[in-house]
């Protein structure tokens, strides 16, 4: 079941029994590492670099995936900008950038992929949200509002495309132990200190990937969102 994933962390692990197409907004080096890992595990993958805020690039990305695999079944919207700034110092340009990547990017990727998802009979759209969309956090007004918008988009998608057997879900991870790009996220988010994980440790990227894989698979066909 080919899947398109925007902004995929390099430490995610997809099952290798099914073919997967991987599109990522990370660097080419990080994206290629994901592709190499999938291929080494017996899978098939395609790296497509695109700016998800630009519809023409998104359309070209989706077209490349569909041409390579002949279909598209899953969209995972994971691209985000998570830099921190006090609200009174937050530049409007940074507010716009966070929403453009996270919300507009999800809009473009999902809408562009819809014709292929409708032909799948097992289509799935999964947005990657965040804990602070529900708890709030200081210095993250732009991030919190953008992540909250993804929750709203998921609720809408749970209704509208359901008639085409397309599910829409959102996974909202808590603090995750992962490498963050300095161009798109704070290395040590302040809110992690104020919202400690109940289990006493940060989660691992694989622990986010597993529920995403389940939501995209046959076991979750009656979980519309």
Image (cartoon, rainbow, N blue to C red):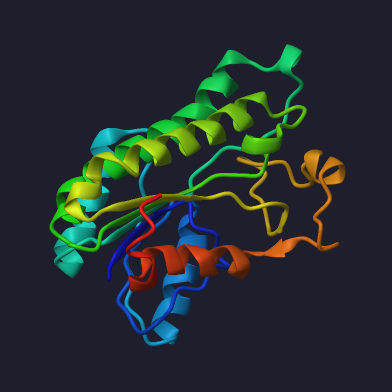
Q: Measuring from the top left, give residue 67's x and y in whole percent.
A: 14, 62
Q: Which quadrant of the rendered structure holds the N terminus?
A: bottom left
Image-quadrant location for residue 52: top left
The residue under the point 24% across, 36% down is 56
Image-quadrant location for residue 195: top right
Whether residue 41 is visible to the viewer of this picture, yes or no, is yes
Is 33 left, or right, of 137 in this rendering?
Answer: left
Height in image: 84 above or below 171? Answer: above
Is 15 left, or right, of 161 in this rendering?
Answer: right
Height in image: 131 above or below 123? Answer: above
Whether residue 52 is visible to the viewer of this picture, yes or no, is no
Height in image: 59 above or below 209? Answer: above
> Closer to the camera, 100 or 133?
133
Q: Which residue lies furthest to the front in this view?
A: 222
Q: Measuring from the top left, give residue 41's x and y in whole percent.
A: 44, 86
The residue under the point 53% across, 41% down is 80
Is 189 left, or right, of 98 in this rendering?
Answer: right
Is 136 left, or right, of 159 in this rendering?
Answer: right
> Closer to the camera, 2 or 136?
136
The residue under the point 17% across, 64% down is 71
Height in image: 23 above or below 187? Answer: below
Q: Measuring from the top left, give residue 194's x and y in whole percent.
A: 85, 41
Q: How many marks?
A: 0
> Closer to the camera, 100 or 122?
122
């Amino acid at each position: 079941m080919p899947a398109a994933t925007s902004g995929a962390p390099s430490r995610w692990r997809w099952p290798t029994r099914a073919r997967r197409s991987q599109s990522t907004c990370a660097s080419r080096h990080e994206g290629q590492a994901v592709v190499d890992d999938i291929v080494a595990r017996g899978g098939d993958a395609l790296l497509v670099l695109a700016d998800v805020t630009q519809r023409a690039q998104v359309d070209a990305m989706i077209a490349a995936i569909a041409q390579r695999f002949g279909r598209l079944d899953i969209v995972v919207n994971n691209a985000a900008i998570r830099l921190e700034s006090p609200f009174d110092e937050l530049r409007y340009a940074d507010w716009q950038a966070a929403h453009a990547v996270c919300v507009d990017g999800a809009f473009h990727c999902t809408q562009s992929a819809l014709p292929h998802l409708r032909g799948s009979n097992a289509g799935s759209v999964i947005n990657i949200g965040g804990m602070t969309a529900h708890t709030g956090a200081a210095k993250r007004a732009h991030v919190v509002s953008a992540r909250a918008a993804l929750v709203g988009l998921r609720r809408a998608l749970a209704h509208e495309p359901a008639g085409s057997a397309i599910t829409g879900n959102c996974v909202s991870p808590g603090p995750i132990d992962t490498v963050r790009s300095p161009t798109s996220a704070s290395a040590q988010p302040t809110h992690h200190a104020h919202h400690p994980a109940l289990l006493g440790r940060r989660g691992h990227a694989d622990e986010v990937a597993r529920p995403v894989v389940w939501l995209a698979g046959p076991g979750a066909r009656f979980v519309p969102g």
